[in-house]
Image: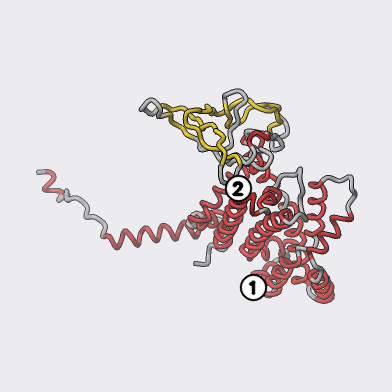
Amino acid sequence: MALEKQNVDLTLPQAVPEDDSVELGAAVKDSRVQVAGQWRLIWWRFRRHKLALISGIILIVIYLVVLFAEFIAPYDPADFSSKYTYAPPQTLNLFDTTNGQFTFLPHVNDYKVEIDQVALRRTFVSDPEKQIPVSFFVHGWKYKLLGIFETDVHLLGATKKGARVYLLGADSIGRDVFSRMVYGTRVSMTIGLVGVAISLVLGIFLGGISGYFGGWLDDVIQRLIDFLRSLPTIPLWLGLAAAFPVTWGPTQIYFAITIILSFIGWTGLARVVRGRFLALRTEDFVMAARLDGASQFNVIFEHMLPAFYSHIIASITLAIPAMILAETALSFLGLGLKPPVVSWGVLLQDAQNIRAVATAPWLLTPAIGVIVAVLALNFLGDGLRDAADPYVH
């Protein structure tokens, strides 16, 4: 009775119409975007680029290999065994089925040697009757992890004494291609980073000064750029390689050449930065910063540079693959790194002989590393370039 007197409405509330819920979700999303910081907006937009996200994960794995190359490689890259010349890759089997049931027993099949009656040469054939047990975190040759901690533990290796495991086969003198490719990753993926960093700093600094101040300073910097862009790179590379002291090792010479060439390679980025600065220096937000009393340094680095992060990111992500491809090409031709240094380009020198490739096609495996790394860097660069300007749809 009391409820009737008070006219209390006991009916359930009606559901929000579907259109209204969609509009409400869009409004909430818009409000989050309006209050979010720039880096959060960049991350939200970047994670929508699935290919770039996958490429970033791949590059993280590659640089983990760079950091822990000694731990991942089962053998010293210079260690060889003439008994296994051009031994083919062995398949890693995780389960043993010899007894008719699946037993977790990581192993590879041993080799047996047969004589090719036509070519009159020996060939390696997988022998399933002889298994080589494989285990994780095995003891092997000693090294210093991260150059600090001395240890002999490796990620993967054979537990049978005297046995060897060739996951990617062996080269002409019986060296493990997998171990050498892991070490080559360290050299090829890091040797150009110093040069790219120097080119980035010089390109942004000199290009920014040229475009922001203009006048005679702009003329001097542009004529310097014209002169540097006229220099032929390959003859300069050869001349510098011959000019360094003979006591220097191959890695020292290559680093020195890379650093010197980076003082030439900043010209392209400088032209891009100059053009953007010429377009931005008359924009309203730049004029407002000047009228507000901001210093020239603050105007350049706090207001103008963030306006074209996408251009800078695109230049960086294109420069690093270019460095990797240049090292690979020059080392392949014998003009870059040379043995005993191990890089992807040096490893591909074994693939110059068509007879060697026909006998051991796994010698081309380092080319797969080059392709994967370059594609991952390009896809990551595309995603970062788009995400760096989150207001553009």
- The reply, left or right, for residue 235 in relation to residue 344 is right
* Residue at numbered disc 2: 359
- The reply, left or right, for residue 384 in relation to residue 128 is right
Which of discs 2 and 1 lies nearer the camera? The answer is: 2
- Locate residue 333, reporting x and y percent: 73, 57
**Which amino acid type is marked by label 2?**
Thr
- Locate residue 157, reporting x and y percent: 58, 30
> Residue at coordinates 64% horizontally, 54% vertically from top-left?
354
Lower sequence index among marks 2 and 1: 1
Along the line of sight, which residue is nearer the eye, 177 or 303? 177
Q: Is residue 262 visible?
A: yes
- The reply, left or right, for residue 185 in relation to residue 340 is left
- Locate residue 81, reporting x and y percent: 67, 33
Along the line of sight, which residue is nearer the eye, 294 or 78? 78
Mark 2 and mark 1: span between their CA atoms? Answer: 67 Å
Q: Residues within 10 Å of mark 2 (few under 14, many from 20)?
A: some
Q: Is residue 47 above or below residue 231?
A: above
Which quadrant of the figure has residue 145? top right
Residue at the extreme left: 1
Which quadrant of the figure has residue 176? top right
**Which amino acid type is marked by label 1?**
Asp
Q: Is residue 189 visible?
A: no
* Residue at numbered disc 1: 284
> Residue at coordinates 64% horizontally, 44% vertically from top-left?
181
Could you say whether the residue bearing mark 2 is in a helix, strand or loop? helix
> Residue at coordinates 46% horizontally, 32% vertically from top-left?
94
